[in-house]
Image: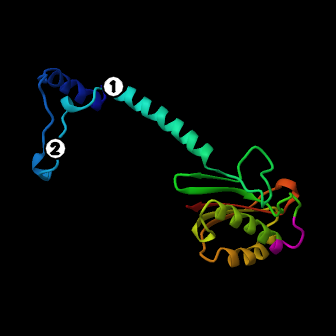
Amino acid sequence: MQRSSLLFARRLPSLLNTPKSFHRPQFFSTIPKMSANMTPVTAKDACPRESFIQLHHSYLLALARTREQQLCDDEIRLTSIFPAAGPYSQAIRANGQIFVSGQIPADASGNLVQGNIGTLTQACCDNIQAIVTAAGSSVSKIVKVNVFLTDMANFAEMNATYEKFFIHKPARSCVAVAQLPKGVPVEIECIALE
């Protein structure tokens, strides 16, 4: 027999004879005293598990309905910039934040802006500014930016325009992608605070 099996076999009788009223040791000396406005809660005071689950389920359903309604009420759409080209919103306001969809270099009528990557980046930034302003925020409250480039050779020129627009230096990711909508070389999305 292995050593661990022998040890268990020796302890088994003592484990089986453990009194049913066995309690774990209490270490009350290490717990600080409660203040006058704090009261302990014991198991008899707690909500029964079934009631808690039913209450929690009802709360989650109500919260989901509220969130769904809030999201529907807080969709941000502008006609002064390029309209959403698919089944999505230009931006959504939720939990004190504004989530701006990716903006490509296009004008309000959907025509693509022509020019170098700096001009195209500026057009994306102008669209972002219009959206966050319409949502009641500002560029200075943007906290996270994602930049998508089809060619990282355009990084330096994009960055030169970017740093003039986002002078407060929000968190940023810049990634190269194979392709962007309408064949544009740059797209920018962001998250702003209200």
- The amino acid type of the residue labelled 1 equals Ser
Question: Disc count in the image?
Answer: 2
Q: Which residue is mark 1?
A: 51
Where does the image place residue 156, in percent across and percent down from the top left?
76, 76
The quarter of the image holding the C terminus is: bottom right
Q: Secondary structure at mark 2?
A: loop
Where does the image place residue 19, in percent across and percent down from the top left?
11, 23
Where does the image place residue 26, in percent across and percent down from the top left?
12, 41
Q: Residue 2, relative to residue 184: is it above or below?
A: above
Q: Secondary structure at mark 1?
A: helix
How much space separates mark 1 and mark 2, taking CA atoms?
22 Å
Foreground residue, 50 or 24?
A: 50
The mark nearer the N terminus, 1 or 2, is 2
Q: Residue 20, relative to residue 90: is it above or below?
A: above
The quarter of the image holding the N terminus is: top left
- The amino acid type of the residue labelled 2 equals Thr
- Residue drawn at 59 percent across, 71 percent down: 140
Q: Residue 66, relative to residue 182: is it above or below?
A: above
Foreground residue, 182 or 65?
A: 65
Task: Let me know if residue 16 is in the magenta part.
Answer: no
Residue neighbourhood size for the residue with mark 1, other residues' Cα within 10 Å, grouped as few (<14), some (14–19), many (≥20): few
Residue 174 found in image quarter? bottom right
Residue neighbourhood size for the residue with mark 2, other residues' Cα within 10 Å, grouped as few (<14), some (14–19), many (≥20): few
- Residue drawn at 52 percent across, 52 percent down: 95
Q: Find the magenta span and give its range.
A: 113-119
Q: Which residue is mark 2?
A: 39
- Residue drawn at 19 percent across, 27 percent down: 11
